[in-house]
Image (tube, grey):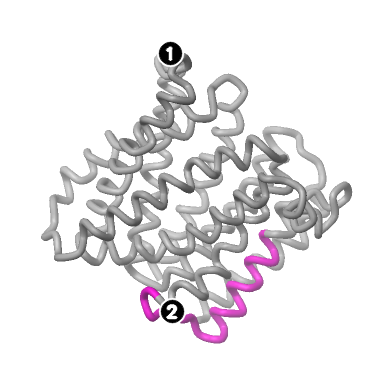
C-alpha cells in the first residue's frame, strides 16, 4: 500500500504549491511563476537523478517525451490564461473532472480500468472535490457549468483537465520506458525549454523578479520536484486513475490552508465535500 502514501504526499505537496502560488501572484508575474515552477524544480530533480542513476532508455521513449512535453507546455499556457480570464471559483472545479476523463483515456492508452469499488471511489472523490471547489452560497453548484457558456477561463481549464487525463497516461508509458525519476527530469527539462520563448515574449521585463524572489521561487521548485517525483513513483505501482483521484484530495488540504492562512469562510459548508472524498479514498483502498 506504499503507493497510497506516495499519492497522499503528492496531494500534500500539490496543496502547498497552490498556497505558495497564491501568495506569489501578489508580487510575481504569472508567466514567471509558471515557468520557474518547472525550471527551478530541475536542480533538485537532477540531484535526485544523480543518486538513482540513469536507466536503460527503451525504444519509443523520445516519441512519448515529445508528445507529452508538447501537451504539458500547452496546458501550462492554458492554465495561466484560465486564471487570468476568470475567478478561481469557476475555473478550478473544472480540474476535478480529470479522473473522470482518465476513466476513458486509461483503457484506450494503457488498457487499465478500475474495479467496481475503485470506480465508485473515483466518482465520490470527483463529486467531493467539485463540492469543495465552489463558493456554494454565492455562485451555486452549477456556476462553473454556466460560466462555460460565457467565460473563457472555465473552457480553458476544462481543456486542461482533459489533456491532463492524456498526459497522466503518457507519464506511465514514459516511466515504463525509462524510470520514474529520469522521466520527470526529461519531462520538466522539455517543458522548461519549450515554455521559455513564451515567457520571453510575455514577460521579458519581469525577469528581475526571479533574482528578487529567488528563495521563494526556489521553495516552489523544491515542492514541485517532490510532488512530481512521488506522483511518478505512485503511478508506477498502481492504476493511473487511482493516483490522480487521490491527488485531488489536495482540495481538502487547500481548503484547510485557505481557512487558516487566508481566513476564507465556508469551512463548515465544505465539510460534506470532505466526507464524500474520504469515503472515496476508503473505497479505492479497498479496491
Q: Position of residue 186 (x, y in %)?
A: 25, 47
In this figure, which residue is indicated by the disc labeled 2? 107
Residue 104 coordinates in the image, percent (x, y): 51, 75
Q: Is residue 55 left or right of residue 79?
A: left
Q: CA distance from mark 1 to mark 2?
A: 46 Å
Task: Check disc 1 and report its element: helix, strand or loop.
Answer: helix
Q: Residue furthest left?
A: 56
Q: Quadrant of residue 270?
A: bottom right
Q: Which residues are magenta?
A: 109-129
Q: Which element type, helix, strand or loop, lies under badge 2?
A: helix
Location of mark 1 (residue)? 208
Is 110 in the magenta? yes
Drawn side of residue 219 relative to residue 63, left or right: right
> In percent of the image, x 11 and y 60: which residue is there?
56
Q: Is residue 278 above or below residue 132?
A: below
- 145 and 132: which one is in front? 145
Crowd tier of the residue under label 1, counting other residues whose Cα lies within 10 Å: few below 14, some 14–19, many 20 or above = few
Please tell me in which quadrant of the rendered image residue 240 appears.
bottom left
Please tell me which residue is depicted at 41% across the width and 45% down the height of the picture.
Answer: 73
* Residue placed most toward the observer, 162 or 214: 162
Q: Earlier in the sequence, mark 1 or mark 2?
A: 2
Image x and y of residue 79, in percent: 55, 43
Which residue is at a point 51% across and 49% down the rendered structure image? 12
Toward the right, the furthest residue is 137
Residue 166 lies, in percent from the top left, at 44, 63
Packing grade of label 2 (10 A; few <14, some 14-19, many >=20) is: few
Q: Main secondary structure of the magenta part?
A: helix
Amino acid at each position: 500500500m506504499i503507493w497510497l502514501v506516495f499519492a497522499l504526499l503528492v496531494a500534500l505537496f500539490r496543496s502547498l504549491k497552490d498556497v505558495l502560488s497564491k501568495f506569489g501572484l501578489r508580487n510575481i508575474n504569472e508567466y514567471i511563476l509558471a515557468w520557474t515552477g518547472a525550471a527551478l524544480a530541475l536542480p533538485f530533480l537532477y540531484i535526485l537523478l544523480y543518486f538513482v542513476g540513469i536507466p536503460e532508455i527503451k525504444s519509443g521513449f523520445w516519441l512519448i517525451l515529445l508528445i507529452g512535453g508538447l501537451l504539458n507546455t500547452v496546458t501550462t499556457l492554458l492554465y495561466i490564461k484560465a486564471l487570468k480570464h476568470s475567478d478561481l471559483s469557476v475555473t478550478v472545479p473544472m480540474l476535478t473532472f480529470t479522473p473522470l476523463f482518465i476513466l476513458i483515456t486509461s483503457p484506450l492508452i494503457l488498457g487499465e480500468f478500475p474495479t467496481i469499488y475503485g470506480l465508485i471511489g473515483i466518482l465520490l472523490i470527483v463529486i467531493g472535490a467539485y463540492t469543495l471547489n465552489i463558493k456554494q452560497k454565492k455562485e451555486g453548484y452549477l456556476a462553473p457549468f454556466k460560466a462555460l457558456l460565457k467565460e473563457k477561463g472555465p473552457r480553458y481549464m476544462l481543456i486542461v483537465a482533459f489533456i491532463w487525463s492524456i498526459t497522466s497516461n503518457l507519464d506511465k508509458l514514459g516511466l515504463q520506458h525509462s524510470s520514474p525519476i529520469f522521466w520527470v527530469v526529461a519531462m520538466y527539462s522539455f517543458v522548461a525549454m519549450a515554455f521559455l520563448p513564451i515567457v520571453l515574449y510575455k514577460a521579458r521585463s519581469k525577469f528581475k523578479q526571479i533574482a528578487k524572489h529567488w528563495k521563494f521561487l526556489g521553495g516552489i521548485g523544491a515542492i514541485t520536484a517532490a510532488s512530481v517525483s512521488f506522483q511518478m513513483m505512485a503511478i508506477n505501482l498502481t492504476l493511473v486513475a487511482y493516483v490522480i483521484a487521490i491527488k485531488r484530495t489536495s482540495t481538502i488540504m487547500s481548503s484547510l490552508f485557505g481557512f487558516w492562512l487566508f481566513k476564507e469562510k465556508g469551512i463548515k459548508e465544505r465539510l460534506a465535500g470532505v466526507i464524500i472524498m474520504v469515503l472515496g479514498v476508503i473505497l479505492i483502498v479497498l479496491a
